């Protein structure tokens, strides 16, 4: 994935809003994307059920609740979806979430500012010095990638 803008990590923020355009350009072929997600699932037990170009910034469970509540207060429409899933005690659970928008709905283009600046997610506070804070290996699932995707797509039973 290639970022759409170059952040100047040395000078102070110019409020360009580039980091609030949160969806990357699609620059992977569908088959390549599928192979990458399959490998991550097999090697690390982490499931990305959607094409990687759909994903945006990581939102924790706690942040999800907070953002939903702030969206209500600020009268902002938001859509938050599951990003990574892992198996825990043979059950598929959601590890984190993402904002399903090309540009963050909390970004105010006219004012060039964040509507929830004090309460913005950790990943926004850390930017551009973000570093992964989650471990990378989880129990290897006893099911193949295609089967899991199909079950999620069909929304069958306990599959989320
Ligand atoms: S929460 Fe604020 S800082 Fe973070 S992406 Fe949205 S508008 Fe930008």
Image (tube, rainbow, N blue to C red):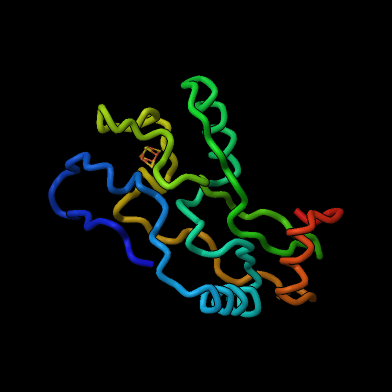
Q: Write the residue at 41% across / 33% down.
A: 106
Specify the quadrant of the image occupied by residue 135.
bottom right
Looking at the image, which is closer to me, 113 or 28? 28
Percent position (x, y) of residue 96? 59, 52
The tally of labels here is 0
Image spot of residue 111 (x, y percent): 25, 27
Q: Is residue 111 left or right of residue 70?
A: left
Q: Residue at the location (79% across, 76% down)?
A: 142
Above/below status of 138 relative to 97:
below
Image: 24 above or below 73 = below
User: Compared to 122, does 95 lie above or below?
Assistant: below
In the depicted structure, whether residue 118 falls above or below residue 13: above
Give the percent coordinates (x, y) of residue 60.
Answer: 55, 46
Residue 99 lies left or right of residue 119; in this view the side is right
- Look at 49% across and 51% down and name the residue there: 58
Residue at the outermost left position: 11
Instruction: Report whether 48 appears left or right of 25.
Output: right
Indicate the quadrant containing the N terminus: top left, top right, bottom left or bottom right: bottom left
| Point 79% across, 63% down: residue | 151
Q: Position of residue 156 (x, y in %)?
A: 84, 56
Q: Quadrant of ligand 1?
A: top left
């Amino acid at each position: 994935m290639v970022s759409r803008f170059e952040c100047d990590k040395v000078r102070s923020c110019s409020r360009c809003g580039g980091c609030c355009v949160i969806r990357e350009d699609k620059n992977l072929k569908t088959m390549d994307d599928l192979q990458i997600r399959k490998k991550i699932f097999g090697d690390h037990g982490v499931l990305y059920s959607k094409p990687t170009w759909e994903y945006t910034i990581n939102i924790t469970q706690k942040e999800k609740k907070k953002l939903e509540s702030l969206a209500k207060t600020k009268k902002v429409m938001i859509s938050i979806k599951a990003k990574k899933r892992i198996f825990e005690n043979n059950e598929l659970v959601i590890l984190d979430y993402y904002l399903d928008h090309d540009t963050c709905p909390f970004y105010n283009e006219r004012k060039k500012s964040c509507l929830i600046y004090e309460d913005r997610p950790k990943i926004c506070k850390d930017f551009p010095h973000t570093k992964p804070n989650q471990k990378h290996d989880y129990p290897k699932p006893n099911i193949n990638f295609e089967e899991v995707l199909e079950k999620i797509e069909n929304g069958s039973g306990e599959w989320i």
